Image (spheres, rainbow, N blue to C red):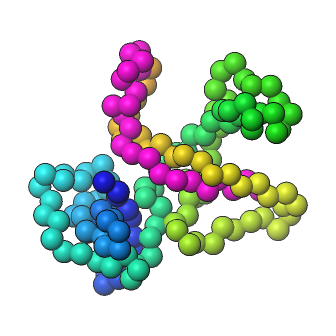
Amino acid sequence: MKFCRYIDPTTRAPRYGIIDGAEIYPLEAENIFAVELDRTPLTDTVNASDVMLMSPVSPSKIVCVGRNYREHAAELGNPMPDEPLLFLKPPSAVVGTGADIELPAASSRIEHEGELGVVIGRKARRIADADEPLAYVLGYTCVNDVTA
């Protein structure tokens, strides 16, 4: 199942939906975490080409992992870290499909990478069981990581 967030062509307000090919089934939910699929009729549709797709979620924070594979560490001339190298990006760094990416005028070096985004669906802290972390994952999304 593929969730999406889009601008409703009638109300011009953000809305969640389930995208299936060229169609979007609108969902009645204030946020993606409040969707109750067993209580949501999937009858109306919107043509995906008639809407502007937004980022699938509006995150409160973006936690990134740097140098998380050997080839990339080698490209940077860095050793592979013993522990995950975490850093944050602001929520304002997220834009929707087809939106402009604003680059600082002073930037002379722009880097881009395809990344896998993991959307966490509920709060988690100090998870002890190695099998339990996936229970906190709501879903996955493709990310175009641009650093200037």
Residue 119 placement: quadrant: top left
Task: Note whether 122 is above or below 142 in the view shown.
Answer: above
Residue 135 included in the magenta stretch of the image: yes
Residue at the far top in the pictured view = 128
Closest to the observer: 133 or 125? 133
Task: Note whether 117 is above or below 104 in the view shown.
Answer: above
Query: Is there any visible trace of residue 102 in the rendered image?
Result: yes
Residue 60 included in the magenta stretch of the image: no
Query: Is there any visible trace of residue 15 in the rendered image?
Result: no
Residue 104 placement: quadrant: bottom right
Task: Find the magenta span and give its range.
Answer: 127-148
Q: Who's the residue at 52% across and 46% down the image?
A: 117
Q: Who's the residue at 38% across and 31% down the image?
A: 134
Q: Who's the residue at 30% across and 62% down the image?
A: 18
Left or right for 71, reference 136: right
Closest to the observer: 38 or 107? 38
Closest to the observer: 100 or 67? 67
